[in-house]
Amino acid sequence: MLETNALQDYTEVLSFRLWQSPDQLRALLTRKEIDLTAAPVNLPALMFNLGEKVKLLNISVWGILWLVSSDPDVKGFDDLKGKELLVPFQRDLPSVLLDTLLAARNTGQETVKLRPVRDAQDAITLMLSGKGQHALLVEPMAAMLLWRNRQQGERELFRVQSLEEAWRETFPNKAELPQAGLMANSNVAQDTELLKAVDKAYAESARWCKSNTLACAEMVNRHIPHLPVPAVEEAIRVTRLESLSANQIRPQLENLYGLLGKRFPKAVGNKMPAVEFYGP
């Protein structure tokens, strides 16, 4: 959208800014330093239910979490019983999804040894050094680990199973797992014309990216140089990247919010978002 000047009819300056954590993102949104952002699906619901009139525009990422292992006998999450799993996120959506999944599969924290690490880079370092055997990573960090291991690793690592696949097996009646999408900050959330234009441009850009993985990976590398092109291209190929408007998939979102709300009500602000939350 930035490089094609997709919003030229609505702004003279369209800029890209990289945030590092959901806590930082929430601070940027509260200070109105950004207007539109990609976000984990629970964050806009949490902010809306805390009184911020934000909107969720779309969901574009439906599977981004991967189990990576050095053990060829590990074929899925059920094979982690009694083993240690590196988890480079605490309190964020991935940890909530993981806990919900493990509890439902009866392989909860008492049988899977969750080892918190500071961030994905720490998990990658431990896996590459052999000090970690299994890790749950968000793309493109899973692809980054596998790429770096091919460059320098002495043991084979395996992309075992996506959390999305395990989720479908565990919750067949709530099989869709919307994980991340685009949200509008409260200062632009009432501009319906703008939000529709953003939603349309984002969907077009996502389709282009999925159909042109190498060109998209090269573009990502230009804006985020520490992500190597081969790793980004692999991440795009294995990720279900399909942008759908939030109001179009409201039932799937409410299924997820309802499920998360039973175990982690604070993650979504203790209630279901009102209908006006779903935009554009």
Image: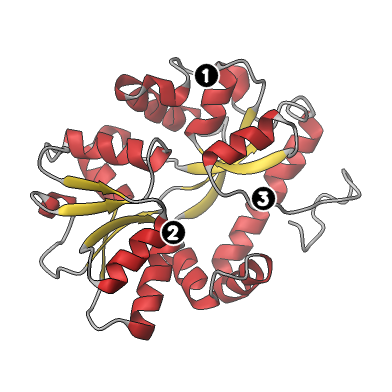
Foreground mark, 2 or 1? 2
Give me the disc on residue 204: none
Q: Quadrant of residue 193?
A: top right
- Whether residue 73 sits left or right of residue 262 in the image: it is left
The structure residue drawn at horizontal position 50% and vertical position 28%, both measured from the top left corner, is 250
Q: Earlier in the sequence, mark 1 or mark 3?
A: 3
The structure residue drawn at horizontal position 18% and vertical position 51%, both measured from the top left corner, is 77
Kind of residue at disc 1: Pro
Q: Secondary structure at mark 3?
A: helix
Characterize the local packing of mark 1: few (<14), some (14-19) or many (20 or more) Cα atoms within 10 angstroms: many
Q: Position of residue 29 (x, y in %)?
A: 67, 33
Between residue 227 and residue 214, name the one nearer to us. Answer: 227
User: Does the CB distance between marks 3 and 2 fall below 8 Å?
Assistant: no
Characterize the local packing of mark 3: few (<14), some (14-19) or many (20 or more) Cα atoms within 10 angstroms: many
Kind of residue at disc 3: Tyr
Kind of residue at disc 2: Glu
Q: Quadrant of residue 159?
A: bottom left
Give me the disc on residue 139: 2
Q: Earlier in the sequence, mark 2 or mark 1?
A: 2
